[in-house]
Amino acid sequence: MINKQRIIDRFISYITIDTQSDPNSTTTPSTDKQWVLARKLADELKEMGMTEVSIDDHAYVMATLPANVAHKVPVIGFISHFDTSPDFNATDIKPQIIENYDGNDIILNKEKNIILSSEYFDDLKQYKGQTIITTDGTSLLSADDKAGITEIMTAMKYLLDNPEIPHGKIRVGFTPDEEIGRGAHKFDVEKFGAEWAYTMDGSQIGELEFENFNAAKAIVKVQGRGVHPGYAKDKMVNSQYIAVDFINSLPRLETPEHTEGRQGFFHLSDMQGDVEETILEYIIRDHDLGHFEARKEMMQDLASEICSQYESDCISVEITDQYFNMKEKIEPVMHIIEIAENAMKEVDVEPILKPIRGGTDGAQLSYMGLPCPNIFAGGHNFHGKYEYVPVESMQKATEVIVKIVELTSENYK
């Protein structure tokens, strides 16, 4: 049985280190503070007895648990990211531990009247009686993905302490900058040397994912013409009005707040502007590759149409692909999903196969030659002050890792 208090202690030791990434940085890692946790993890891996522990010039950490069986078993891996989302405050995280949760609202911050509502966030109710770790309402929790790191580290320590559990060679990897879409960019797949791997980066207990969005980023630049407003008739062109035309011409119900499951969307994530120039930042998402390409084409066509109305090149759209649906790379090796499913069932977790409405390092790694589906890490409400994680979910995720390595060894006898 995985020790509950050790899970809590390890998790808190990681989340209290600020590792927020920065999308505006050009370095890897994007912030120097990510090095603090990267070095801590490397030191802990060495101390627990892992071999081939390395940390490269970009803070990617890797290590090996050597095989303890004589027969040939595929090398498999487990991966998590140590950076924290830049979407919300990640400094000075003060976790709260609620034991024997009663199923009702949780007061995160009495002074600021910040409440984790069990009616609004109704997933909470399924964890009645369990131990819940929350924020204090002033920061995110960083369970994404320090819960995953906690589970991998705890599982490796458990396997080292219990050598009677048979397993092949296991590789673990911890990456920077996943939250800004660059976590796999400098991951050395050849050095990692695994036949397949799993990211421990999902949400609620039971999640097992091998489908994700195709993803792109779009920068829409709208050019206007500034003229003194007192003399502006037939001369001024206000870029902000043109930008509003562009925004309102995209399908209004095809946005994150109106979509679910495999439905794609356009998401206006940032808007800055004045009369002379307005810049819109969008992300484009769709599980279906054909629909994804159509969305990109729609934005370009819309820009051309508006430009023709103004008889000028007033709008430019620059689209950059970010990652693609890993389903194409996982379907030829579905046995790796079956192993994970069976592992969950053996530790009394009901598998929930669902598409990711987002992306993980695993999506990019799958296209780099390392098939890499995603397994639950246990957290909820990522990237904000309402983030929480049940400790029992982290325990179960750790048990799933241990069972996966055991079943993989048994399957290849």
Image (cartoon, rainbow, N blue to C red):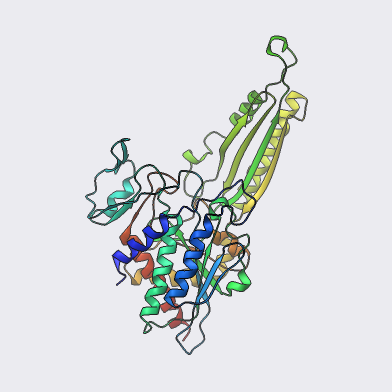
Which quarter of the figure is the N terminus placed in? bottom left
Is 122 situated left or right of 152 in this image? left
* Foreground residue among 1 and 353: 1
Q: Which residue occupies 38% across, 68% down?
A: 398
Q: Is residue 392 visible?
A: yes
* 112 over 367 or under it: above or below: above
Q: Is residue 349 visible?
A: no
Q: Position of residue 61 (x, y in %)?
A: 54, 67
* 360 over 255 or under it: above or below: below
Q: Position of residue 113 (x, y in %)?
A: 31, 35
* Foreground residue among 62 and 224: 62
- Name of the residue lying farthest toward the top: 230
Q: Position of residue 309 (x, y in %)?
A: 73, 24
Q: Position of residue 195 (x, y in %)?
A: 56, 74
Q: Which residue occupies 73% across, 33% down?
A: 304
Is 177 situated left or right of 234 in this image? left
* 413 over 398 or under it: above or below: below
Q: Which residue occupies 78% across, 25% down?
A: 311
